[in-house]
Amino acid sequence: MITVLRQSWPLLLGVMLLMLGNGVQGSLLGIRGASEGFSTFHLSIVMSAYFLGFLAGANLAAPMIRRVGHVRVFSAMGSVISAVLILYPMLVEWQAWALMRVLIGFCFSVVYITAESWLNNTATNETRGQTLSAYMIVQMLGIIAAQGLLGFGDPSGYGLFIIPSILVSLSFLPLLLATVPAPTFDRTNPMSFAALFAISPLGCAGMLLTGGVFSAMFGMAAVYGALMGMSVGQIAGFVAAMYIGGLVLQYPVGWASDRLDRRAMILWMSLAGAVVMVLAAAVPLPYALELLVAGALGGVINPLYSLLISHTNDYLSKEQMPSASAGLIFLNGFGAIFGPLLAGWAMGFIGPKGYFLVIGFCFAGLGGYAAWRMSRRAAPVQGSYAGLSPTASTVAVEAVLERAETDRSGAKQ
């Protein structure tokens, strides 16, 4: 790990600053929008718009980079992000925010792909697993730390919008000044969704549902907190607890998944998440228990995402991995567009607790489908598990698939 940090620290530092900036704006908009009187449904559109832009960026990043190069694309996207972050408090209309969220989601998607490409390029076959683990930890720590920044200003003013703009601007310094050469982007022949579904029905359905859960969880958490009357500090703690839960449970879940049928892990974790969400919706909870629920939610959805990636890999050949990773990310991004919309509709119809009910419904659907798929075919030879955040791009997912396939091939010999 020391070798990984010595080789990749400029890139990891840049990613940390990026996550700080992005983590602040995600929570801040929910708090500010609620205080401005935006309806729950309008806020759900604003939050969903980010994932629409993110999905578009995931599909257009590679052609852009091949056309003008990493440095130009990276610098252009960073400039747009910084500008949009400052524009939010100047154009306090939900329609304007939705359009800016599409734009900023697109830019962050392209920036993540560029950063992950560089990180993957620095790694050798021996250090790729450690590099991906360090990347995941840095991502989580950045978002957790971002929630602490909410206490350094007033959400109704300008200061808290300027802070993430500065952080994003600073994040490009270590990335652009790094001595690591920019990687190349090879053209990938896309795999049809029918072919991908035939290979791994559970992987496809799971990525679609977890995309919705993650976007609802992250996008509407601050809105839920505001509707429940939480203070800014309490909302920050609520959001941070989700990522702490995901960080803490990644390793034990990964350890177990390398020894047990991953479909069983997906089944029981999904059902556990569904039960916790239904109980949270049905029973009034003090703030301390709200934090435990948030930790459980993050502790389920983050490892579930990695489990589904690893499970799908168990059915792929090495040649299928680049196109399969693109398909999986598209399904996850497509599901993410609808998560905040469904949560916002439910919260507007039955109250704030609709937030937990929508997430619980998605967990129950995933658990039920996993149980059905277990009855259809035997478990495959499993590759190794690697923790990933649902914000990872196709670059990181493809790297995980290739590493796991190498381990799987070794297990067969």
Image: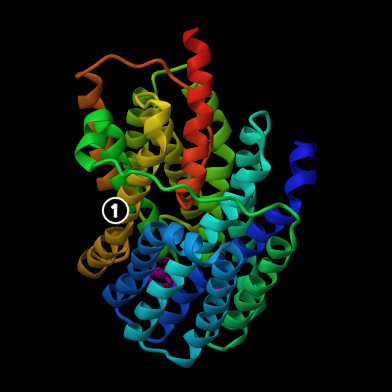
Residue drawn at the location 23% of the way across and 17% of the way down = 377
Q: For residue 191, which quarter of the picture?
A: top left
Where residue 397 appears, as percent x and y from the top left, is 47, 42
On-image quarter of the N terminus: top right
Residue beneath disc 1? 335
Label 1: element kind: helix
Q: Residues within 10 Å of mark 1 (few under 14, many from 20)?
A: many
Residue drawn at the location 32% of the way across and 53% of the way down = 212
Where residue 264 appears, as percent x and y from the top left, is 35, 23
| Residue 279 appearing in the image | no
Q: Give the camera-side residue of 224 and 375.
A: 375
Q: Main secondary structure of the magenta part?
A: helix
Residue type for callout 1:
Gly
In this view, the residue farthest toward the front is 67
Q: Give the camera-side residue of 99 and 249.
A: 99
**In the image, is residue 201 above or below residue 181?**
above
Q: For residue 323, which quarter of the picture?
A: top left
Q: How many marks?
A: 1
**In the image, is residue 44 above or below residue 252?**
below
Where residue 351 appears, as percent x and y from the top left, is 27, 66
Residue drawn at the location 71% of the way across and 52% of the way down = 180
Range of the magenta residues? 223-232
Residue drawn at the location 29% of the way across and 77% of the way down = 42
**In the image, is residue 151 above or below residue 194?**
below
236 on left or right of 61? right
214 part of magenta stretch: no
Where residue 207 appears, as percent x and y from the top left, is 33, 43
The figure's colour scheme reads rainbow
